[in-house]
Amino acid sequence: MQKTYNTQENVKFDEDQGWLTAPGKRGTVILLHGSHASPINNELLATELAKLQYGIVSPLLKGHGLGGEYPTATSQELITQVQQCIEDVNKQENFCIVVGSSMGGTLALLAGVLDNPPDMIVSISGALSCRDIDHPWIRVLNELKTHLMSKMSEIQIPTLIFHDIDDNSVPYEDAQIAMRHCGSEQKKCILFSGSGHSLMFSNYAKQIALDIENFRNSLRKKKKITLEFFGEASEVYLAGEFNNWQPTLQFEKQNDRFVLQTRLLTGTYPYKIVVDGRWILDPKAATISTPNGEKNSRLVVD
């Protein structure tokens, strides 16, 4: 028989779907539990975030049962599940935050390099290593870590990292590694002590929820921009300082032009347009020179 429970903040627990609330005024938080665990571990933080008017989605990750069964899911299946959760939340056009603990923290960081990432990611006790070499999920954890470390410099969205210096399962040095390698311009690490690897569901849950809210409120705002390119081409991409010069933002063909709409943090950025593999200046934009004299197009977002 399916069981549901309700907390004082109307956070409903469903054995199949995890913790759920109605959409929140402040957006939606996707809460990801760790390996050998379940959404039950997320109750305290889910309740505190609901008090701050966030909607909550906390799925039971593939390969897990309520008792934390042995793994029956691959690393790619977990990433795909997280991606689907983000896509479902984005349909609501709400601010989306992915928060994860332990292996869920690793998945939260990986959410930052998906094609359609959330607006913000939060890793709590995120695992880039594991002291227990006999842990049943060690193979999956290692696969996630390897994939993450090869991509972490590509993270561009705001990133908040929590860790406890007394964590005996995942060393707090993992948080320092994540901070060094994360490519986001807006990132912060907050350290606690005394809760070990149980930080997400400890007495610090209320403080963590407030820290998440304060970090969000401190962020520079993103503004919508539209760029156009006129000319014959098969594929047109945008690359610049805002995405580590990776030609990943693709223009869409519309009649006699290519159009790109995206959101960028306020600031001034050098960029180039990549037309069928050729890096060129934007004919419609002003230019800016590097110290060695190379010219780039200049984009001002204000």
Image (cartoon, grey):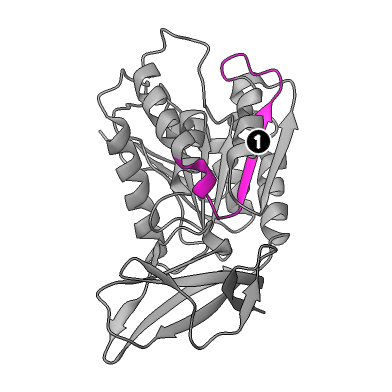
Residue found at x 28% / y 81%: 253
Residue found at x 73% / y 54%: 214
User: Quick one: 270 or 212, which is closer to the camera?
Assistant: 270
Q: For the view shown, which residue lies furthest in the top direction?
A: 134
Q: For the view shown, which residue lies furthest in the bottom direction?
A: 256
Coordinates of residue 240 in the picture (x, y in percent): 53, 65
Q: Is residue 163 magenta?
A: yes
Query: Does residue 222 appear left or right of residue 63 in this picture?
Result: right
Residue indicated by mark 1: 162
Residue 230 visible within the image:
yes
Considering only vertical position in the picture, is 258 above or below 242?
Answer: below
Q: Amino acid at mark 1?
A: Phe
Q: Is residue 113 magenta?
A: no
User: Dot 1 lies on which element?
Assistant: strand
Q: Which portion, as a residue range, is magenta?
A: 151-170
Coordinates of residue 35 in the picture (x, y in percent): 42, 25
Q: Quadrant of residue 54?
A: bottom right
Q: Quadrant of the N terminus?
A: top left
Residue found at x 62% / y 31%: 177
Considering only vertical position in the picture, is 135 above or below 82?
Answer: above
Q: For the view shown, which residue lies furthest in the front direction?
A: 293
Q: Quadrant of the C terminus?
A: bottom right
